[in-house]
């Protein structure tokens, strides 16, 4: 199977509020897809469903051919145990809006904690790998710094290194730059560009349109819990087909132009 992520008729509700409404989506291995749309359109919820941080109410999600969160017996789906779900998540790295670093640990300790405690990796081996990852995210001089001594952008780059330390086959990013001051956004996006160049499969929720245009293989626009349009990035930005997509892009690009003029 060439698909890293495949969702079929996925639905999710919180009480009476339907957040995902019959999502069909496929992300090929080795590609980068950006999910865009207004706040509340279901982007982050869908991302969290991919690694079963949110339990879906209907449909199916597969990652690298494995049904996430359930096992099938005939036509019936049975929930997996917490330990089975945890094993599935080992292959899925996730970077959140907030960095969620352990404040009492140095940067390198944050990076090696899961490989040592969860994967049982030899500590010296984990440290060597952690140093390489910290170099990859441009922080080789911050190994012994505590989170409070790092800027928001640096903390987010440590969080990316921490996710990569588990050697994931899929990386999920939930608006990784939204909590950062504007001048720190670029350093995080640069690390993500580098990851894309290595062939890492990535699903990214973002408001950074220029980044999506430049880095993504494809872009999906979500509105009211549905994927309205999903197309190669050049086609999506150059010749969108759906009226809702056109209206969204027009508004976003107009706002970006106003901000540049004001600056």
Image (tube, rainbow, N blue to C red):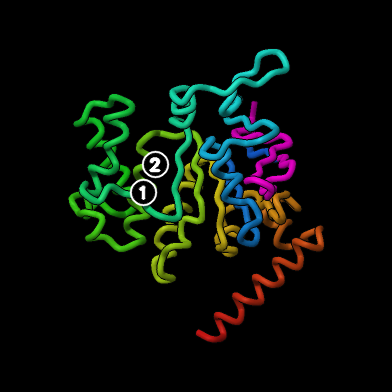
Q: Are marks 2 and 1 in contact (CB under 8 Å)?
A: yes
x then y, percent, for residue 127: 22, 37
Please determine whether, in this image, residue 176 is positioned above or below residue 94.
below
Q: Which residue is mark 2?
A: 163
Name the outermost residue toward the front. 15
- Please give the count of numbered marks on the rendered protein: 2
Is residue 245 or residue 238 the one in the foreground?
A: 245
Q: In the image, is 163 to the left or to the right of 171?
A: left
The quarter of the picture where the N terminus appears is top right
Q: Residues within 10 Å of mark 1 (few under 14, many from 20)?
A: many
Please state if 219 lies on the left or on the right of 100 as rendered.
Answer: right
As displayed, is residue 155 above or below residue 132? below
Q: Secondary structure at mark 2?
A: helix
Residue 168 counted in the magenta span:
no
The reply to whether the magenta stretch includes residue 10 is: yes
Q: Which residues are magenta?
A: 1-24
Q: Main secondary structure of the magenta part?
A: strand
Q: Is residue 30 visible?
A: no
Q: Quadrant of residue 166?
A: top left
Q: Which residue is mark 1?
A: 159
Q: Quadrant of residue 201?
A: top right
Residue 24 % position (x, y): 72, 40
């Amino acid at each position: 199977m060439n698909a890293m992520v495949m969702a079929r008729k996925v639905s999710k509700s919180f009480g009476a509020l339907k957040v995902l409404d019959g999502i069909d989506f496929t992300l090929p291995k080795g590609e980068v897809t950006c999910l865009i749309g207004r706040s509340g359109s279901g982007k982050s919820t869908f991302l969290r469903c991919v690694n079963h941080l949110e339990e879906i109410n209907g449909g199916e999600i597969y990652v690298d051919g494995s049904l996430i969160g359930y096992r099938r017996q005939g036509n019936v789906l049975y929930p997996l145990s917490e330990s089975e779900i945890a094993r599935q998540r080992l292959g899925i790295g996730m970077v959140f809006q907030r960095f969620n670093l352990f404040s009492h640990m140095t940067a390198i300790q944050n990076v090696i904690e899961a490989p040592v405690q969860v994967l049982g990796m030899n500590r010296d081996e984990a440290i060597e790998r952690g140093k390489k990852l910290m170099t990859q995210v441009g922080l080789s001089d911050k190994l012994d710094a505590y989170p409070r001594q790092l800027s928001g952008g640096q903390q987010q780059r440590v969080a990316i290194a921490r996710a990569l330390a588990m050697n994931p086959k899929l990386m999920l990013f939930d608006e990784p730059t939204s909590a950062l001051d504007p001048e720190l956004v670029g350093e995080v996006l640069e690390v993500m560009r580098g990851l894309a160049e290595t062939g890492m499969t990535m699903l990214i929720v973002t408001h950074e349109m220029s980044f999506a245009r430049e880095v993504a293989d494809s872009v999906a626009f979500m509105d009211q819990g549905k994927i309205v349009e999903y197309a190669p990035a050049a086609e999506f930005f150059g010749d969108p087909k759906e009226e809702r997509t056109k209206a969204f892009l027009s508004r976003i690009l107009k706002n970006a132009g106003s901000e540049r003029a004001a600056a």
